[in-house]
Amino acid sequence: MIALLLGTYAGSAAHAQTVTFDLDDQRAAEAGLDTGAVQTDLGGRIEQALGLVDPTGTLEHYANASAMATRGMGVDYATNPKRFSLGGVLGSSVSGVPLAFGRGPEALPESGYAFMASLYGGINLGAFAPGEGVLDRFSLYVNGMAMRPPGNRVFRGNMYNVGAHVQAKLVGPLNVKVVEWGGLDLTTGYDRSFYQLQLDQQLPLSQDVGGEPVTWNALGSYQISAASGSIPLELSTNLRVLVATAYVGGALDIATGTATSAASLSGPVAAGGTSLGEVGVSLDGAGDADNVTERVFVGVQANVLMLKLFGHLNVGSNETWGGFVGFRLAM
């Protein structure tokens, strides 16, 4: 029996990772395999699937994705409500990978990822005062939700978010019935979000080694947790033509956020019906979100009387994207 160590990193007391192989040379030879090749090929597959190639960078992406996922979820940019606006949204964000809004059922997402859903409610302060006045230019919004999204993926998610925002109409709208320009809005507030991925079942990882499939069945614990708080400073405008509205805006986001990971996994390695030994993984890491990010956002909305259906896209300067869809009732 030979013990092999792959990819040990200990940059600080708070950040370390190891992948250890305890393989039987004789059994591997009987299966037509070399333990060194199993270590190299299967080890690379494990490192890639579990985010061990660059743990700090991966966790930084998770922190950025968590921060991006809620931006814009608790505000109405399209309707120019005179009384109220309330609704619900769901979406996701990614960081460090090409624009996408989902992940497969196997292992972890390729890089930073977060899913979010939220309910929001907003009111125009002018609704409390008769006639038209300065209060008509201000709307207050609150939002939040906590849930564990349903699913059968190997890694399951948990999330919560809360937020409060104020929107000021710097330039009033111009309405000519079939066309309405919404003016210019300034929006700011505070968002708090948390997203966690946790191993929910046995994790099988397979890799061809010399043409022979070798499988590691991992058992144990693995979780990535990302928490962030951010203050957005946004300028936006919208344009309605008949029953369709489009909006666009720019933002400067000031954020604090950290993602952490902790893993302790072990399990047998087998090729065909032959047991080759054991593999273990341990991980303890952390990464921080970017503190200042520029962002642009766009959205479209369909208006059916008080019911509005909309989609929203955020694009950050730090290779982070987010999007969501939702509905609202507004007037």
Image: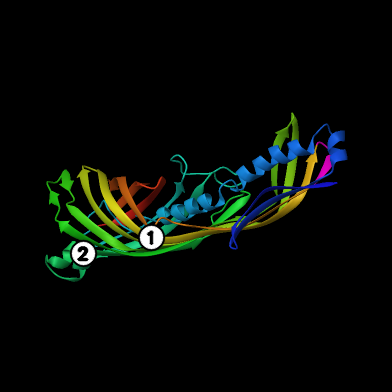
- At a point 18% along the width and 59% down the height, the residue shown is 169
**Disc 1 or 2, which lies upstream in sequence?**
2
Image side of residue 117 versus residue 310, left or right: right
User: Looking at the image, which residue sits at the far front?
Assistant: 11
User: Looking at the image, which residue sits at the far bottom?
Assistant: 129
Tell me the distance, in whole angstroms, between the alpha carbons under discs 1 and 2: 24 Å
| Residue 207 in sight | yes
**As shown in the figure, which amino acid type bears the numbered disc 1?**
Ala
Magenta range is: 272-277
Residue topped by disc 1: 255
Q: Secondary structure at mark 1?
A: strand
Q: Nearer the viewer, residue 152 or 270?
A: 270
Judge the density around disc 1: few (<14), some (14-19), many (≥20) Cα neighbours within 10 Å.
Answer: many
User: Looking at the image, which residue sits at the far top?
Assistant: 211
Residue topped by disc 2: 138
Look at the picture and state if 124 lies above or below 80. Answer: below
Image side of residue 318 versus residue 330, left or right: right
Quadrant placement of the C terminus: bottom left
Look at the picture and state if 210 lies above or below 14. Answer: above
**As shown in the figure, which amino acid type bears the numbered disc 2?**
Phe
Judge the density around disc 2: few (<14), some (14-19), many (≥20) Cα neighbours within 10 Å.
Answer: many
**Count of labels in the image:** 2
Q: Nearer the viewer, residue 54 or 211?
A: 54
Image side of residue 253 versus residue 90, left or right: left
Q: Position of residue 5 (x, y in %)?
A: 72, 48
- At a point 42% along the width and 58% down the height, the residue shown is 118
Q: Position of residue 247 (x, y in %)?
A: 26, 46
The rendered magenta stretch, by its main secondary structure, is classed as strand
Quarter of the view holding residue 244: top left
